[in-house]
Image: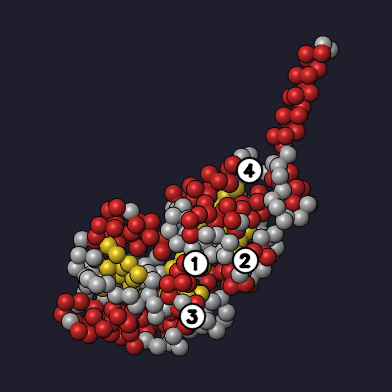
Amino acid sequence: MSMRMTIAATLLAACTIGARAQTVPEDYPADYAQTIEASRDELGLLVYSNFPASFWEPLIEAFDEAYPWIKVETANFDAEMWEKYRLEAKQEVRTADIITTVAPEHWVQFVKDGHLEPYASPELPNLPAWSVPFKGLYTISAVPMPIVWNRALVNPGPQSLAELAEMVKTDPDRWRNKITMYDAEVNPYGLAIMRNWLNHKDNDWSLFETIGPMTLPERGAGTMREKTSTGEYLSIVFTSGLGISQLEAPGGKATLDYAFPKDGTPLSLQSIGITKTASSPNSAKLLLDFILSRPGQIAFAKAGFTPYREDISPDEVPFYTLPMIRDIVGEENLFIMSYTPEALAGTNELIERWVKTFRQK
C-alpha cells in the first residue's frame, strides 16, 4: 500500500471512529457511553403525546444534532392513548417508547399497573422534587394557566380570579355568557385544572359560583382564543399557557391580553415517562434525559413550553420561565398539580359540582 493510500485509510478510520464516538454529557456517569452506543442498534422512537407535532419541532431539531441516528416519530392523541397503549402492549406489537400527557389519574393507574419504566435519569439532581411525582415519571414543563381577555372590550383586564368575579358582580348583564373556560365535564385537562385550583383553595367554590352562571365552556383552547378575539367572549378563565406563543404573536397581541392570576396560577404538569414495553429503551433514555437537560428545556421553550429549571435565565427563552412567573405572582400562588390519592379523590363529586355550577343557568 502506498504512503498516500495509508494516510487516506488512516483518516477514514479516524473519521469513522469520530462519527461513532459521542460525548457523554457533563456530570453524567461514564457508563452512559454504553447507553449511547446501544441506541445505535435500535429502530428509532415512537412517542405518544397530547400535543401536535409542531410543538416537537424545536426539541427534535436540537436532539437530532446530538443524536442524529435516532429517528423520533410522534403521534398526537387525547384520552384514547392509554387504551391504545394497553391494547398494543397486550398484543405485543410496536407501541409507544415514551408517553407524555397531562392526566394525573391516568398516570397514577399507569404506574400502579406496572407500565412505567422506573428509570433514574442523570438529570435528577437538577430537578425539583415536585417534578418527579413517581420514580420514572418526569415533567417536561410546568404549564401556567393565565386569564385572557379581549383588550378592546375589557380595559383594564382582571389580574386575578377575584377581580374577574368583582367585574361580574358590578355588571352581570354585560358578562352574561361572555366568559369561557375548559369544559371539565368532557375535557380531562379542564377537570385537572379545576381540581388543582380547588385543592389549593380548600375546595372554595365561591368565585366559581359568581363566574359560573356567566360562563359557556368550550372543549379546546384554540376555540376559546378565537371567540374571545372576535368579541363573542370577553374573557377566558384558565387557558393553557402553551397558547402564550399565539397570544404574543402580532395577531394575538392586537386583540388579546392575559395575566397570571395573582390569587392562584394553576400549573399543569406535562408529565413524561418511558414505557415498560419500549422497543428502543436506550434511545428513550437519551431523549428523556435530553428533554430534562438545559438544552432540552430551552429547545422546548421555543414551542411555548415553560421551563422550570432554576439554571435557565430569561434571556435564553422567548417567553417565560417558571421562576419569572413566580416573581410575578409569588411562590404561594403557584399551584402545582398533585398526584397524591387525597388530591385525586372524589372525581364524580367534582364533576357533579362543576355541572351544577357551570351548566345550570
Q: CA distance from mark 4 to mark 1?
A: 28 Å
Residue 67 is marked as: 4
Q: Residue at x 67, y 68 (%)?
A: 135
Kind of residue sitting beneath label 4: Tyr
User: Local crowd at mark 3 within 10 Å, few (<14), some, or many (≥20)?
Assistant: few
Query: Which label's residue is closer to the chain start, 3 or 2?
Result: 2
Q: Label 2: which residue?
A: 127
Kind of residue sitting beneath label 1: Leu
Q: Secondary structure at mark 3?
A: helix
Q: CA distance from mark 3 to mark 4?
A: 40 Å
Residue that sits furthest to the top in the current view = 2
Q: Residue at x 25, y 57 (%)?
A: 254
Quarter holding residue 70 = top right
4 vs 1, front mark: 1
Q: Label 3: which residue?
A: 332
4 vs 2, front mark: 2
Kind of residue sitting beneath label 3: Glu
Q: Label 1: which residue?
A: 322
Q: CA distance from mark 2 to mark 1?
A: 13 Å
Quadrant in the picture for the C terminus: bottom left
Where in the figure is residue 39, as x and y percent of width and height? Answer: 69, 45
Quarter holding residue 193 = bottom left
Kind of residue sitting beneath label 2: Leu
Give 312 or 290, whichever is nearer the viewer: 312
Q: CA distance from mark 4 to mark 2?
A: 23 Å
Give 7 or 114, whichever is nearer the viewer: 7
Query: Which label's residue is closer to the chain start, 2 or 1?
Result: 2
